[in-house]
Structures are given as C-alpha cells and as structure tokens.
Amino acid sequence: MPASSPDSILIYAAGFGTRMGPLTRDMPKPLVRVGGKPLLDHALDVVDRAGIPRKVVNTHYLGEQIADHLAGREDIRISHEMPEILETGGGLRHALPLLGPDPVFTLNTDAIWTGSNPLGQLLSAWDPTRMDALLLLVPRARATGYRGKGDFILSPDGRIGRGPGEVYTGAQIIRTDLLKTIPETSFSVNKLWDLTLAAGRTYGTLHDGGWCDVGRPEGIETAEAMLTEGGLV
C-alpha cells in the first residue's frame, strides 16, 4: 500500500445490540446469523478480501463468546473493553496500541453488502493530503432496512456536512491523532468527526452496490433477500 494509506482495521463488536431484542439476550449481535453465517464473519470476509493485514476486533458485551468464535484466527487481535463500554470513539482510542499508526479503517458489523468491496472503494478514494476522514456513504434509496433521514450531505467536491441526505454505512478511513484531544473516556466517533468537519477535511464517497442495515430482527430476512437477489447465498 502507498505511504499514508491504512493497513489496519478496527471491527466494532462491543455493543449491546439492544435493538435486536431477545436475539441478543444471550448472544452478542455480531454472532447473530444472516444467510447461515454470523454477522461478524460477513464483516471479516469483507476485510479479508480487501487484504488488510492488521485486524482488531473490539469486545465488551458477552465478549467471551466473540473471543471463542475467533479462537482459530491467529491474525486477529482483540481489544476488550472493561469495566465500561467505551463507545465507538473511546473504543477506537483504546485499540490504538493494537492498530498502530494512523490512519486506520473502521467497520461496523451490523450490515450486509453487495457490490464492490467497501474497504477497497475507500482505499481507492483516500487522499491523505486533503482528508482526515473518508466515510463510505450510500444513497438513501439504496439503504435497505434503514429508517432514518440520512446522515450527511455530499458536496460536489466530495466534502460532507451533517444533515439529511446520504446514509453512513459504517465503513470509513480516519486519522486518529485528534483522539488525544478529547477528554472523555467513553464517547462516540461523532466527537472525532466534529473536529475533522470543523477543519473541512471530512469527505465521503458512495458505495456502488447494495447495503442493508441489520440492526433489528426484521433486518435479517431483508438482508438475506438482498444476498439471494445478488446470488451470494
């Protein structure tokens, strides 16, 4: 990979999965199955196909189940958050000793993808001379299972601003040096985006395929239908 390109990724797997209701009472959401395979494994397939060598999975809720599931993967390090969950921003900062120098990829596990590899698309569009953060977005019309109004407005020059518009897919490349300026221990990555947005160095690029939010139980069937339609199951 060229200089200033990421070679590490944090895969988010620490959350409580409360929107999944009883499905996550005794199982962490990343182990919920879609198309016969845990969501975490779908995410790892994306990572493996992108060829990212340094992989970190963060855990908290029922983290021992995720650790057991990954026991055969010697290429994956676990960043376990105790005693408190650290949210997406705090979790990223906690994992930095395992991730190495910035920038890094991050990827949520509660989504299913079709089309080009999302991480490959990010890498192709990444320009460290202009960007501190590059978010992969999807048009609202192609955000299957998503109920909101959108997250960001994408400008013609690629910069983004907050507001109803394109939907954040949960995949990004981001510089991490500004994390040291945030005083809280547990905080959302939104606080880091606030800093990169204020500097005018937050960009977006559109995913070329399908994306399905699997945050709720009904999202499982919807995601499986999308995979079937794409010939992936």
Image: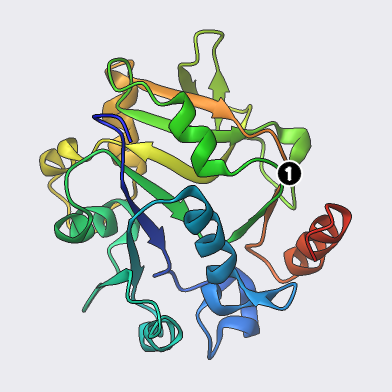
Would you place residue 200 above or below residue 139 in this image? above
* Between 160 and 118, the one nearer to me in the picture: 118
Residue 179: image quadrant is top left
* Between 18 and 133, the one nearer to me in the picture: 133
* Between 40 and 162, the one nearer to me in the picture: 40
Label 1 crowd (10 A; few <14 / some 14-19 / many >=20): some
Residue at the extreme top:
156
Instruction: Using residue 142 as the reference point, say whether residue 3 is left or right of it.
Output: left
Residue at image position (48%, 34%) is 122
The C terminus - image quarter: bottom right
Tag 1 secondary structure: loop
The N terminus - image quarter: top left
| Type of amino acid under label 1 | Gly
Residue 231: image quadrant is bottom right
Instruction: Using residue 220 as the reference point, say whether residue 166 is left or right of it.
Output: left
Residue at image position (72%, 39%) is 209
* Between 91 and 224, the one nearer to me in the picture: 224
Q: Position of residue 131 (x, y in %)?
A: 33, 22
Residue position for label 1? 210
Q: Position of residue 70 (x, y in %)?
A: 41, 80
Q: Position of residue 130 (x, y in %)?
A: 32, 15
Instruction: Using residue 198 as the reference point, say whether residue 62 is left or right of it.
Output: right
